[in-house]
Amino acid sequence: MTAISLWSSLHDARLHTITSNLLERKATLFFSIWHINKFHKLPDDLDFLLTFNAVTSVRAMKWVMWPGEFALPSHSTYEEQTQLVREYQSKWRDQSVDWDALEQLLQRGESDITIFDAELAIEEHEFAVKLVGYLDDDICHVLFLHAESMEITDSRGRLYDLQQFLRLGQEYWEDFGK
């Protein structure tokens, strides 16, 4: 299995729509990636679509914070604060989210998920993607999709291979780093 980070292209992207078709076994994720559009002089309203075909699994979870008290003492060192945060976060839990309800929420245009991490795993005829992001910049969600194939297009219909899509992000971040 080959694991590929999609961070360069999807970090800070906004997942604003998911459409699924159970009969066709298809799911499409619509991303607006303003910084890539601006850097590459693409139209502001251009979306990037990741379409998964022969979908075998979709799953969504959110992180639910432990409701107990938590405070960082002002006199603590960075290392002590890091340890306290780690201990606090270890009390959180993953909680399942209804996929259909998440799709509907995004389709209404009231919410989106800002991606901060993304990874793709590929093995012969199997594609698995993991997306981690904040719903409305608040609650962290993790989405998983498994399918037999994946296609990347933009909203104008242009097809990208995976390397082309990754290069769009890599070029932006290299320039950003200068």
Image (cartoon, rainbow, N blue to C red):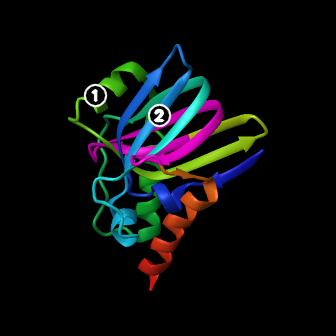
Quadrant of image for the N terminus = top right
Residue shown at 51%/73% (left/top)? 171
Q: Name the spot of residue 80 as percent of width and height, x first.
A: 44, 64
Which residue is the site of mark 2?
Answer: 28
Against 163, residue 156 (above or below) is above
The chief SS type of the magenta part is strand
Which residue is the site of mark 1?
Answer: 105
Q: Name the spot of residue 15 as percent of width and height, x first.
A: 37, 43
Residue shown at 59%/49% (left/top)? 119
Decide which of tag 2 and tag 1 comes sooner along the chain: 2
Q: Name the spot of residue 44 as percent of width and height, x first.
A: 28, 59
Q: Nearer the viewer, residue 120 or 62?
A: 120
Q: Nearer the viewer, residue 69 or 176?
A: 176
Foreground label between 2 and 1: 2
Q: Nearer the viewer, residue 168 or 79?
A: 168
Against 58, residue 175 (above or below) is below
Q: Residue furthest front?
A: 157
Span shown in magenta: 130-157
Q: Whole-Å distance between the Cαs marked 2 and 1?
A: 15 Å
